[in-house]
Image (cartoon, helix red, strand yellow):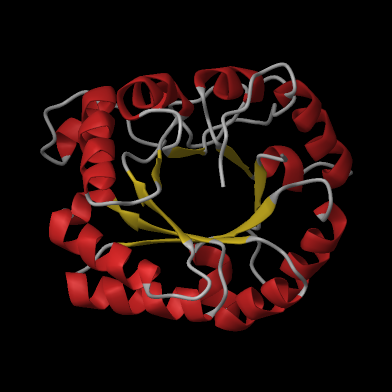
Amino acid sequence: MNRILVALDVPSAPEALALADRVRGAVGGLKIGSQLFTSAGPDIVRALTARGDKVFLDLKFHDIPNSVAGAIKAAGDLGVWMVNVHASGGPAMLEAARHAADSADPRPLLVAVTVLTSLDESALASVGVGSSPLDQVLRLATLAEQQGLDGVVASPQETAAIRRQLGKDFLIVTPGIRGGSATTGPDDQRRTMTPAEAGRAGSSYLVIGRPITAAADPAAAAGRIAEELETSTPPTSP
């Protein structure tokens, strides 16, 4: 199983399609975030799913329950493989999102964002969260599991604790992959690990952007990271 999801964080559909063509077969899926979706819209999702690509729609929906349910239904209609919401939207929103995902055919995996990897304890305190990143992640991950979601998005630093608390079948999607074969320049990630460290901690899927997309040969870069991941024991994931 290839656990690498490459982030297509590029500004246009032609660039995204070209990058997808370069990494197809070397990664397990493609992540479309807010930059590309705002620029290219749902057509870029349709174009990639039509080619047979697994698309993780990373728009982090966070709104009233009815609005989020509608967004999840629309994502399902696009044929995405995975979609996410913010766990901090609360139990009613998470339940509405899960019901919407359950009604889609095929059903997308539904995961909840816990604490962004750019945030540390002082940043959380500045928005009124008195908990440590780990405590807040575990609180939100437990809430997502209680509402029937498939998993969460969390930094690799919290992965082992989530795995211990919520078991082997709960999906953990981890951005914040840096170092090792994923070495890159300074950026806004704060809570990071190498690919092998994240794999050993129990990550189900690793979202990796610049270490692959900024490489001269993205497929080769993805291959090196995949080799590093082979030193870890992968969990069983859909």
Whether residue 64 is visible? no
Above/below status of 201 relative to 217: above
Whether residue 118 is visible? yes
Looking at the picture, tell me which residue is in the foreground, 72 or 104. Answer: 104
Residue for point 75% across, 22% down: 230
Residue 92 vs residue 178: left or right?
Answer: left
Residue 70 placement: quadrant: bottom left
Residue for point 65% across, 77% down: 44
Looking at the picture, tell me which residue is in the foreground, 209 or 168. Answer: 168
Residue 138 rendering spot, x and y as whole percentages: 26, 30
Residue 6 vs residue 81: left or right?
Answer: right
Residue 16 rendering spot, x and y as whole percentages: 72, 66
Residue 154 placement: quadrant: top left
Quadrant, the N terminus: top right
Report the number of numbered marks: 0
Residue 147 rendering spot, x and y as whole percentages: 23, 51
Residue for point 24% across, 58% down: 94
Residue for point 52% across, 33% down: 176
Looking at the picture, tell me which residue is in the foreground, 103 or 182. Answer: 103
Residue 211 vs residue 25: left or right?
Answer: left
Residue 235 placement: quadrant: top right
Above/below status of 154 relative to 56: above
Residue 110 vs residue 33: left or right?
Answer: left
Residue 217 rendering spot, x and y as whole percentages: 89, 44
